[in-house]
Every structure is written in C-alpha cells, then in structure tokens.
Image (cartoon, rainbow, N blue to C red):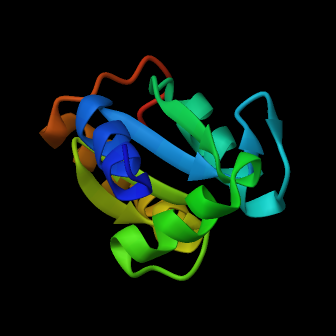
Amino acid sequence: MSMHEFIDNQVKNNDVVLFMKGTPDSPQCGFSGQMVQILDYLGVEYKGVNVLEDTDLRQGIKDYTQWPTVPQTYVKGEFVGGCDIVREMFQQGELQQFFTEKGVPMNGKAEA
C-alpha cells in the first residue's frame, strides 16, 4: 500500500481523523494539543494519526491535501483545515454545526 493509499484509507474509513504530531494522549506540539482539546471538549470520537512516526507520512499528508502544515482534520472524508481554521470554526459555533450536518455525534458541550 502506498502512503497516498494509506492516508486515503484513513480519511475515508474514519468519521473524524486528526493527523497530528504525537497522539491524542500525548500531543507533541501546541497546535496538535489545541486540536485534541477542541475535539475532546466536544466529545467527538476521532482517530489520531501520529505523523512523527514516519517521515513519509509527515510529508505524505501535506502532499495529500496540498496543505503545508500539521495538524490536519478530516470529517467524513472532507478536509476541514488546520488548527487556526478549526479553532476559529469552534469559537464561532460553526464546527459544532458542521459536525451536526455531517452526522457526527458530539457527547460534549455544544457551545464554546
């Protein structure tokens, strides 16, 4: 399986995927940590994929979306954005609405 196929498989077979530095239990950068906090706060189930485990994956995810930074968030196969975009969506209540529209359950609080 190529790196592109691996990434494509993760994106298409998980409702919410966070490509990040580190793991949800141990983020290795502040931006990844912020993403984990937002998703955990909302109670969204997601899969964290650690790009630090594989240099091909770290570059591959950037090539996959033509987006230069990590973390990257995908919902139902759709690229949502990096930390700044997702954080802004969360603060405006747009992220919660987006999850609802996509049929992604939230067990946390629905408002920022």
Left or right: 32 in relation to 46? right
Residue drawn where x is 29% and y is 32% of the image: 15
Q: Is residue 9 above or below residue 109?
A: below
Residue 79 location in percent, x, y? 31, 61
Residue 44 location in percent, x, y? 45, 27
Residue 71 seen in render: no
Residue 111 location in percent, x, y? 45, 40
Q: Nearest the camera: 78 or 6?
A: 6
Left or right: 89 in relation to 76? right
Q: Quadrant of residue 39?
A: top right
Give the quadrant of the N terminus: top left
Residue drawn where x is 60% and y is 76% of the image: 69
Residue 6 location in percent, x, y? 39, 44
Left or right: 37 in relation to 47? right
Q: How many marks?
A: 0
Q: Nearest the camera: 86 or 96?
A: 86
